[in-house]
Image (cartoon, rainbow, N blue to C red):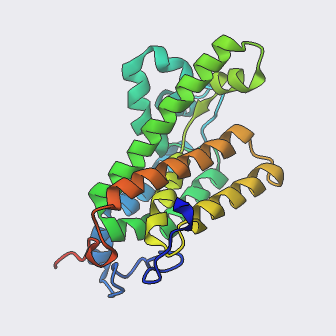
Amino acid sequence: MFFLKYNYDLPLIPIVLPWKNSKGKSLNLLQAYRSRFFTYNFLIIIWVIWYFLGDMSSTNCITPQEKIGCSAAIWHNNIKNPIQYFISFFTSPFFYNSSQHIRFTTITFLIFVQSFEAKVGTKNIILVFFTIIISIGLLGGIVSNVGFYLFPESNTFSNMLERNWMGASSGFMGIIGSMSHLSKFKFVLPGGVILFESWNYFINEISLTISVTHIISCLFGYFLGKHLLKQKSVDNLKEVTPSG
């Protein structure tokens, strides 16, 4: 089974400290910033937006701030307007509906996303991040619209269409899945996501749709990461050590 493959030369959890490169060498402040260009700029942007606009809403678009967030979010009803729908895949990750939401994203980026960027480089992590968001967004749009057409009385599908979707959770869950190929035991990170989402649903009482979406994102990321890294050995992974 693919989740049971292992390589003893790899770490169990492939975390890189933010001030070091993929080989463990310490970097100065500018080098660290340049080696995680996507991670740190993404965090700066989302916090600036949240500072000035505050919490967005998943259902209401009343205040001027909420209208901005609603226009940037993914609405699965907009699948009938392909251009607007596609653009929302690139704008929705920058808006958040609660302080807990943006803090969870920040912690995940500082632990996992910057580690993966240090290993594979900025271009590759942007590729994984937005490919996952686009894939999950399209899947959600198809499932919700087709499901509602077939089962119009189902609350699950109607709720998916009546609310919007924002934040970077699908993207970074996909990155965690991709990182599985940098671990000696490939099941550790996907298993951790499944356990976390089980807690998220049964204890934290988050929406089942959201937990399932996170797990699917992780699995998508696993297979995308396998393709991305299949021609790279661990020793030949890009070492992001900027000059200067």
Q: Which residue is drawn at 39% across and 44% down?
A: 130
User: Where is 43 relative to 72, above or below?
Assistant: below
- Between 18 and 63, the one lying in front of the other is 18
User: Where is 147 relative to 91, above or below?
Assistant: above
Q: x, y (%) of residue 241?
A: 24, 77
Total marks placed: 0
Q: Which residue is drawn at 54% across and 34% down?
A: 65
- Between 63 and 220, the one lying in front of the other is 220
Q: Which residue lies furthest to the front in this view?
A: 1
Q: x, y (%) of residue 110?
A: 49, 68
- Between 164 and 141, the one lying in front of the other is 141
Q: In which quarter of the image is residue 55?
A: top right
Q: Residue furthest right?
A: 203
Q: Can residue 158 be seen in this view?
A: yes
Give left or right: position of 191 versus 32. Answer: right
User: Where is 104 relative to 147, above or below?
Assistant: below
Q: In which quarter of the image is residue 192?
A: bottom right
Q: In which quarter of the image is the C terminus?
A: bottom left
- Between 164 and 223, the one lying in front of the other is 223
Q: Which residue is drawn at 54% across and 50% down?
A: 219
Q: Can residue 50 be seen in this view?
A: no
Q: x, y (%) of residue 15?
A: 48, 75
